[in-house]
Image (cartoon, rainbow, N blue to C red):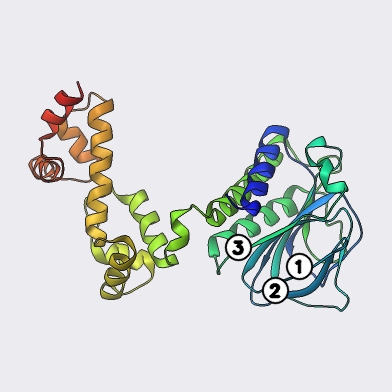
């Protein structure tokens, strides 16, 4: 696991374990770096412009466009010249927790490529919207949203939990897409969207290739070639494999009838399901269940 993923995992587990921290700012970066020292972590998603000569304490870094970076603000952050760049940023207050004591002593900086990802942007937007709704108002002069549990008197328990859920969702999503072992990184976004669509809709017996290609945002022919290139099989074969994996799980772990399992995974004809199952496993569904015993 890369350094940035280890830190994301560490912060994710800390938030999950300790509750909702203060979020001094969440939103689009209002201006160039001029951050005074503060016990905070900053999570930045740079879009169409990079940043150069960013001083994080005594460390100077440059980051290209379409990168995600994580750094601390304990020793301050600034650039020698004003730089305007399109980015989303989140500040997280980690003051007073021994888990992050080391950040008082030295700068933290790590980054990784992150091509344009609408899901990540939507997660930033969702968290910012909830902070604006339930928070105490921005702590910076620029427009933005922040959340301070001590100052947000109007925030009810449901509001706090919604903000915490959105924060955990953003951190988990970033960890997921940046993890070097994540299979999704090796696939284009269109293929990822198709996989997500199939995982949500495989129970629908009426799914056809045009439905999946529409979810991927491509024509059926183009999508079929792209999916086969990256997944090693046609889209509808992948759908069949997802259904059969679920069928095996249900056969082995439930008392559902074969007919019920067939309907549950998207087959309108139980006999067709049994033929497909046998062609893949070499056994009928009933024989498979008996073998698992």
Q: Residue at x 44, y 66 (%)?
A: 189
Classify mark 2: residues with Cα within 10 Å, few (<14), some (14-19) or many (20+): some
* Residue, disc 2: 86
Q: Nearest the camera: 91 or 141?
A: 91
Q: Element type at marker 3?
A: helix
In the picture provided, is 176 more to the left or to the right than 152? left
Q: Element type at marker 2?
A: loop
In the picture provided, is 280 more to the left or to the right than 127? left
Q: Can residue 153 be seen here?
A: no
> Going from the N terminus, do you reach mark 3 or mark 1 first?
1
* Residue, disc 1: 29
Q: How many marks?
A: 3
Q: Nearest the camera: 137 or 80?
A: 80
Q: Element type at marker 1?
A: loop
Q: Residue at x 10, y 40 (%)?
A: 282
> Going from the N terminus, do you reach mark 2 or mark 1 first?
1
* Residue, disc 3: 121
Where, by quadrant of the figure, is residue 96 drawn? top right
Q: Are marks 3 and 1 in contact (CB under 8 Å)?
A: no
111 in relation to 277, above or below: below
């Amino acid at each position: 696991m890369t350094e940035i993923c280890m830190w994301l995992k560490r912060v994710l587990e800390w938030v999950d374990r300790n509750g909702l921290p203060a979020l001094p700012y969440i939103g689009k970066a209002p201006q160039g770096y001029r951050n005074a020292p503060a016990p905070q972590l900053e999570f930045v998603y740079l879009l169409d412009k990079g940043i150069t000569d960013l001083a994080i304490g005594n460390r100077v870094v440059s980051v290209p466009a379409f990168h995600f970076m994580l750094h601390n603000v304990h020793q301050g952050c600034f650039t020698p010249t004003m730089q305007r760049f399109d980015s989303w940023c989140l500040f997280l207050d980690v003051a007073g927790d021994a888990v992050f004591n080391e950040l008082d002593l030295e700068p933290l900086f790590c980054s990784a490529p992150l091509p344009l990802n609408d899901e990540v942007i939507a997660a930033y937007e969702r968290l910012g919207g909830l902070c604006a709704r339930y928070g105490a108002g921005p702590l910076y002069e620029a427009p933005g949203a922040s959340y301070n549990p001590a100052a947000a008197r109007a925030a009810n328990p449901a509001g706090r939990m919604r903000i915490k859920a959105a924060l955990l969702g953003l951190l988990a999503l970033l960890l997921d897409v940046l993890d070097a072992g994540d299979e999704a990184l090796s696939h284009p976004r269109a293929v990822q969207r198709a996989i997500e669509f199939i995982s949500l809709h495989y129970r629908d017996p009426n799914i056809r290739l045009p439905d999946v290609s529409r979810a991927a945002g491509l024509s059926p022919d183009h999508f079929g070639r792209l999916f086969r290139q990256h997944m090693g099989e046609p889209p509808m074969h992948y759908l069949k494999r997802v259904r059969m994996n679920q069928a095996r799980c249900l056969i082995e772990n439930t008392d559902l009838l074969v007919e019920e399992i067939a309907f549950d995974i998207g087959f309108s004809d139980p006999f067709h399901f049994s033929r497909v199952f046998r062609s893949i496993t070499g056994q009928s569904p009933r024989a498979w269940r008996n073998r698992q015993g």
